[in-house]
Image (cartoon, coloured by chain):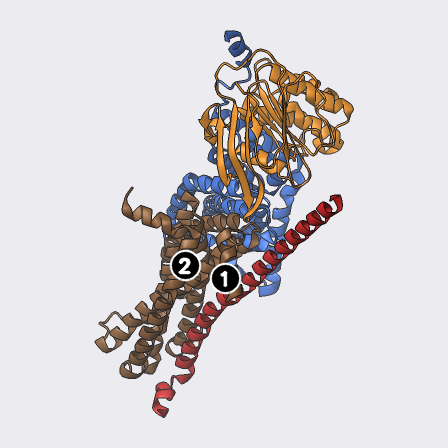
Chain colours: A brown, B orange, C blue, D red
């Protein structure tokens, strides 16, 4: 057997992953916090105000990374969901289900910050702009997955049902995006580009990229933390979980 | 050959081997189950179980409410996936697409529409599963004493009559292995005898049947070879 | 031994009924059921009629305004009128155990699901489309736009039914499934509504309307191929109780 | 410092945006921790109940043995 599948196979065993995730989590969290702090300093203090948008553009440093993360989390969820559906791996089910709330959180931030950015720029809190509309639809996709998972009593059955929904959603996502774009041109809605087509200045670019990296690291840290809880919930009756709880009680 | 091996773990088994000749053409038992276990939300529901069922045999699964009889049947039918163990059908590891049509499954629910008559319901079932040679809907309903209700919507029938309508498929559909959940529920003495007669004739022709019962009704047919499997709660 | 095999031959299935045969049996059963409950056909129609009647009261009876919004209102009304029927598409089958019988049948489940969904559409949604000219009249939809609306509906509603069937299978047997289904259907319905309403709006303002209709047709073909498999997978999860 | 907080007149948009970012992510971090504590309590309770049942069973067994002896 190939070394990598073997290694993956070992890692997908819940107790091994539980310990592994517990060991890795602080590293991801702390690097996310440090990089995030640096990015905030660069974005809020060092970067000069935009010549068109003034200081309002500084919302970009959280809005854009969160918008990327909202899609990235969905993509991760769909991959885990596919693995869960095809191979029925318990860990994949847990990971797919734990991606959803993180993705929903990032989507929510994207929507609210977009609205806060849109008010001074467009003069309105909400506009049916193609990008914002797609993001709203994405939020509904996430809510559907979370709602379905919670509506089904049996956790594993719920996870597989919600995984199937996530897969239906990822087929739908590009269709939504293009249909909304088409709809927008049809109705001549605002096509204000918050992020200009022009080249972004380096002083603005590096904090942005740093923040993108920080949010990715945070996503992994949060996913590891959530997956640990999810595994414990699914495997609560197993021997390893019992030992772990007994250990905790002694400490 | 030990054609009624069935033991291990929580199940107590008594096997009665009476039939002298083997009807089975192939050596492998029709159903061979090893180490079969099922857990829901990590709570074990039953197992691990080992048993084998040969052609011509009836297996009566007994147990209290909540002992996992229904779950066992659904696992065997392929509606649920076992958490551990192996099921072999005719010597082959279970591949459910291949098995479909060689098995008659009757669950708690009748699997029939209340707005349709027994006749229409059975016609639909045989449209999916086919019909045994020489069997038709009318004769199947006659076998369960339901001929006069053939065209009455199911909702007008009593619980026992509904059960009989559901059981009528046993006289109609092809399939070597019968999986019958609570086959005796809602039936009167005559109904119970009728089920036994259907099962006995099925087994005498080389079929096999697996029945569950919560123990209130004793398996009454003295001629059948049968294995008893008790599931502990 | 040969005697035994001969005895057994009638038990063993040599060739199960072909897919077409099973589909015909399922079709006959569904149509019979629909006929027995034929008064149910009226519910979505009545619902749509009520909604459409309320709009002029809420917005005022000016013809120009009603004409402008009629296409979109009719589409959304049809979508909403479909929801309750979508939600209960598999509930009865799950409760009385006939779903298990379909799952265990020798034919591919996806094929049976396809027949099931299309007959469901024909018995619950087609009546809505039949009364659509009347509703269009009430909302002052220009008569020359009506054919486009009907074609858009004939493409969009089976598409919604196929996608709704997946969701209905996923929510079968859960509590609060109605609101959950609506929540899950919204993202899937967005492109359908956009293209269907887009075609009607384009026809109304004299613009070419073929492109959105073709998009709908393409999506419908895609859904006809893919949705039955997804729905079959969802049903297998639904019976795992 | 005042200039920095004023954000060139856009303070009422920029700072709430950052506040939302931190509040939502903080919630995202705390929610699983709370769930974990609840879950551990529940599992601990389940284990304690099981142990109690086992102890009782053992006690009744020894009592029976004592009675028979």
Nearer the camera: disc 2 or disc 1: 1
Q: Which residue is mark 2?
A: A19
Distance in Å between CA atoms under marks 2 and 1: 13 Å
Secondary element type, mark 1: helix
In the figure, residue A21 lies in which quadrant? bottom left
Residue at horizontal 45 percent and vertical 54 percent from the top: A94
User: For the residue carrying disc 1, how many other residues have a C-alpha within 10 Å: few (<14), some (14-19), or many (20+)?
Assistant: few
Residue at horizontal 39 percent and vertical 47 percent from the top: A83
Q: Outermost residue, right direction?
A: B189
* Chain to which the residue tagged by mark 1 belongs: A
Mark 2 vs mark 1: which is more N-terminal? 2
Do we see residue B85 in this rendering? yes
Q: Nearer the viewer, residue B193 or B34?
A: B34
Q: Which residue is mark 1?
A: A247
User: In this image, C122 relative to B143: left or right?
Assistant: left
- Residue A136 position in % (x across, y down): 44, 63
Assign the C terminus of chain B to one quadrant of the image. top right
Residue at horizontal 73 percent and vertical 24 percent from the top: B192
């Amino acid at each position: 057997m190939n070394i990598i599948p073997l290694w993956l196979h070992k890692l997908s065993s819940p107790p091994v992953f539980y310990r592994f995730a517990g060991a890795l989590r602080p590293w991801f969290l702390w690097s996310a916090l440090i990089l995030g702090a640096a990015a905030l300093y660069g974005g809020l203090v060092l970067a000069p105000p935009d010549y068109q948008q003034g200081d309002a553009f500084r919302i970009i440093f959280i809005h854009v990374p969160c918008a990327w993360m909202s899609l990235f989390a969905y993509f991760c969820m769909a991959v885990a969901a596919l693995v869960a559906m095809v191979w029925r791996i318990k860990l994949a089910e847990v990971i797919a289900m734990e991606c959803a709330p993180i993705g929903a959180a990032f989507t929510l931030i994207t929507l609210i910050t977009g609205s806060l950015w849109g008010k001074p720029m467009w003069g309105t809190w909400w506009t049916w702009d193609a990008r914002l509309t797609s993001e709203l639809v994405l939020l509904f996709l996430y809510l559907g997955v979370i709602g379905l998972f919670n509506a089904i009593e049996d956790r594993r059955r719920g996870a597989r049902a919600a995984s199937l929904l996530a897969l239906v959603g990822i087929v739908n996502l590009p269709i939504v995006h293009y249909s909304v774009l088409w709809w927008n041109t049809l109705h001549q809605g605002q096509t204000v580009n918050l992020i200009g087509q022009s080249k972004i200045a380096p002083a603005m670019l590096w904090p942005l990229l740093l923040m993108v990296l920080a949010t990715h690291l945070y996503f992994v840290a949060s996913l590891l933390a959530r997956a640990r809880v999810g595994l414990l919930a699914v495997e609560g009756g197993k021997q390893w979980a019992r030992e772990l709880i007994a250990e905790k009680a002694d400490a | 050959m030990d054609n009624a091996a069935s033991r291990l773990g929580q199940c107590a088994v008594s096997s009665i081997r009476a039939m002298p000749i083997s009807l089975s053409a192939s050596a492998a038992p029709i159903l061979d189950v090893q180490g079969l276990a099922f857990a829901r939300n990590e709570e074990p529901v039953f197992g691990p179980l080992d048993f084998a069922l040969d052609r011509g045999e009836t297996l009566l699964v007994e147990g209290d409410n909540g002992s996992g009889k229904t779950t066992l049947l659904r696992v065997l039918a392929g509606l649920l996936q076992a958490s551990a163990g192996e099921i072999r059908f005719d010597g082959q590891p279970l591949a459910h697409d291949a098995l479909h049509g060689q098995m008659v499954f009757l669950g708690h629910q009748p699997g029939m529409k209340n707005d349709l008559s027994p006749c229409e319901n059975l016609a639909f079932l045989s449209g999916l599963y086919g019909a045994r040679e020489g069997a038709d809907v009318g004769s199947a309903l006659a076998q369960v004493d339901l001929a006069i209700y053939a065209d009455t919507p199911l909702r007008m029938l009593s619980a026992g009559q509904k059960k009989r309508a559901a059981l009528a498929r046993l006289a109609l559909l092809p399939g070597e292995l019968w999986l019958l959940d609570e086959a005796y529920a809602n039936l009167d003495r005559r109904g119970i005898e009728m089920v036994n007669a259907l099962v006995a004739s099925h087994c005498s022709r080389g079929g096999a049947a697996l029945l569950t019962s919560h123990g209130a009704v004793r398996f009454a047919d003295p001629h059948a070879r049968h294995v008893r499997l008790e599931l502990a709660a | 031994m040969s005697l035994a095999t001969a005895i057994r031959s009638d038990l063993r299935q040599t060739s199960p009924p072909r897919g077409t045969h099973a589909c015909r049996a399922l079709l006959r059963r569904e149509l019979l059921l629909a006929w027995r409950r034929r008064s149910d056909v009226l519910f979505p129609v009545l619902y749509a009629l009520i909604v459409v009647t309320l709009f002029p009261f809420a917005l005022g009876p000016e013809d120009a305004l009603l004409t402008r919004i009629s296409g979109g209102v009719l589409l959304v009304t049809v979508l909403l009128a479909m929801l309750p029927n979508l939600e209960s598409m598999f509930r009865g089958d799950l409760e009385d155990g006939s779903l298990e019988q379909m799952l265990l049948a020798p034919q591919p489940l996806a094929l049976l699901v396809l027949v099931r969904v299309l007959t469901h559409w024909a018995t619950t949604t087609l009546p809505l489309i039949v009364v659509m000219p009347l509703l269009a009249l009430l909302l002052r939809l220009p008569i020359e736009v009506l054919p486009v609306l009907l074609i858009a509906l004939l493409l969009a509603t089976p598409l919604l039914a196929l996608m709704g069937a997946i969701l209905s299978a996923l929510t079968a047997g859960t509590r609060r499934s109605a609101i959950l289904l609506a929540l899950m259907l919204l993202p899937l319905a967005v492109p359908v509504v956009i293209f269907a309403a887009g075609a009607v709006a384009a026809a109304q303002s004299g613009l070419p309307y073929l492109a959105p209709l073709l998009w709908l047709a393409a999506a419908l073909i895609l859904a006809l191929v893919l949705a039955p498999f997804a729905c079959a997978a969802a049903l297998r999860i639904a019976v795992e109780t | 410092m005042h200039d920095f907080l004023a954000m060139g007149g856009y303070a009422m948009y920029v700072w709430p945006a950052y506040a939302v970012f931190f509040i939502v992510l903080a919630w995202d971090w705390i929610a699983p921790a709370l769930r974990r504590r609840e879950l551990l309590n529940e599992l601990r309770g389940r284990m304690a109940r099981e142990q109690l049942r086992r102890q009782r069973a053992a006690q009744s067994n020894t009592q029976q043995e004592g009675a028979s002896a």
